[in-house]
Image (tube, coloured by chain):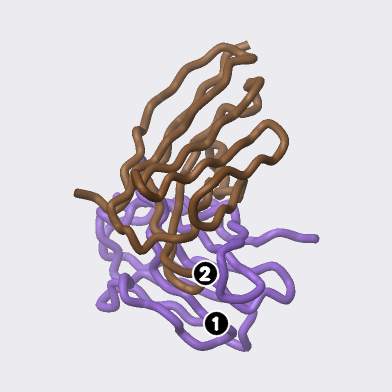
Chain colours: A purple, B brown
C-alpha cells in the first residue's frame, strides 16, 4: 500500500513570496489533515478535511493560508505572503475516516528567508 | 500550563537498556492516547494507541496510562540503535476530535 505522498520535500523562499504544497493521501482515505511542525515542537493541526469538506480550520491563519481538497482526493496548502515565522515542516496525514489512526507523509520543509 | 508536557531530552541510553518515556497532561477530558515515532526528516509513525487507563503491550513496546495522575508512559525493552528517534505523545477527548501533541522526546540508543 502506497503511503501519503507530499511534494516538494524542501522549499526555500523569501518573505512575502507565495508557496504551495501538494499532498496525495492513501487511496480510500476520506479524511485529510495538514499540520505545521516547528522545530522542537509537536505537530499543530492547521486544517482537516472530510472528503472535500472542511471539518476544522480553527487554527489556520486564514489571512495568509489557504487549502483546498478538490474531488476529495489530493490537497494543496498555500501560503501567501509568507512570513519568517512560517519556517517549519508541513505534514500531511490521512485516515480512513475521522479517527485516530492517522498516517503521515514525509513532510515539506519550508525555509523563509 | 501547557495541555501536554513532554521532556524534550535528549535521552541517551546504551543498547539493551529499558527506556521510559513520559507525558503529563492537564485536560481531564482526554480519553485516547497515542505514541508516535518520528525519525529525522520523516513524518510521525503511529506506534501505540490506547483508550482510557491501563496497559497495552506490542512486542518490545508497552504503553501505560494513569488517568488519575494524568500521566502516560511508553516503555521500550531491549532498546536498539534503530529506536533512536523522537517520540511524540498525542491525545484527544474522543476519536473524532483534534489531536494535541507533546513536543517530543529525542531518544539516542548507542551501540
Left or right: A101, with A49 as reference point: right
* Residue positioned 34% across, 52% down in the render: A87
Look at 46% across and 32% down and name the residue there. B21
Write down the residue under mark 1: A50
Q: Residue at x 53, y 54 (%)?
A: A107
Q: Are tags 2 and 1 found on a single chain?
A: no
Element type at marker 2?
loop
In this view, the residue in front, A13 or B28, is B28
Residue pointed to by mark 2: B95
Tell me the crowding category of disc 1: few under 14, some 14 to 19, or many 20 or more residues within 10 angstroms, Cα based. many
Label 2 marks a residue whose chain is B
* Residue A39 visible to the viewer: no
Q: Nearer the viewer, mark 2 or mark 1?
A: 2
Identify whether A36 is placed above or below A64.
above
Whether residue B41 can be seen here:
yes
Q: Say what secondary structure mark 1 lies in.
A: strand
Which residue is more in the foreground, A83 or B24? B24
Q: In this image, B67 relative to A96: left or right?
A: left
* Residue A113 image point, x, y percent: 29, 49
Where residue A22 appears, x then y in whole percent?
55, 68
Amino acid at each position: 500500500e502506497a503511503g501519503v505522498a507530499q511534494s516538494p520535500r524542501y522549499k526555500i523562499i523569501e518573505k512575502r513570496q507565495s508557496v504551495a504544497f501538494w499532498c496525495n493521501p492513501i487511496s480510500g482515505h476520506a479524511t485529510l489533515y495538514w499540520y505545521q511542525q516547528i522545530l522542537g515542537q509537536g505537530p499543530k493541526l492547521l486544517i482537516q478535511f472530510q472528503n472535500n469538506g472542511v471539518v476544522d480550520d480553527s487554527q489556520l491563519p486564514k489571512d495568509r493560508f489557504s487549502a483546498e481538497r478538490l474531488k476529495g482526493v489530493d490537497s494543496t496548502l498555500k501560503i501567501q505572503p509568507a512570513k519568517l515565522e512560517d519556517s517549519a515542516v508541513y505534514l500531511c496525514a490521512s485516515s480512513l475516516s475521522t479517527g485516530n489512526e492517522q498516517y503521515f507523509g514525509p513532510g515539506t520543509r519550508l525555509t523563509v528567508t | 500550563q501547557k495541555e501536554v508536557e513532554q521532556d524534550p531530552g535528549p535521552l541517551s541510553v546504551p543498547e539493551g537498556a529499558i527506556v521510559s518515556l513520559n507525558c503529563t497532561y492537564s485536560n481531564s477530558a482526554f480519553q485516547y492516547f497515542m505514541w508516535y515515532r518520528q525519525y529525522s526528516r520523516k513524518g510521525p509513525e503511529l506506534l501505540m494507541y490506547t483508550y482510557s487507563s491501563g496497559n497495552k503491550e506490542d512486542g518490545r513496546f508497552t504503553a501505560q496510562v494513569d488517568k488519575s495522575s494524568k500521566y502516560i508512559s511508553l516503555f521500550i525493552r531491549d532498546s536498539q540503535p534503530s529506536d533512536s528517534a523522537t517520540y511524540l505523545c498525542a491525545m484527544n477527548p474522543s476519536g473524532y476530535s483534534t489531536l494535541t501533541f507533546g513536543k517530543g522526546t529525542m531518544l539516542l540508543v548507542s551501540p
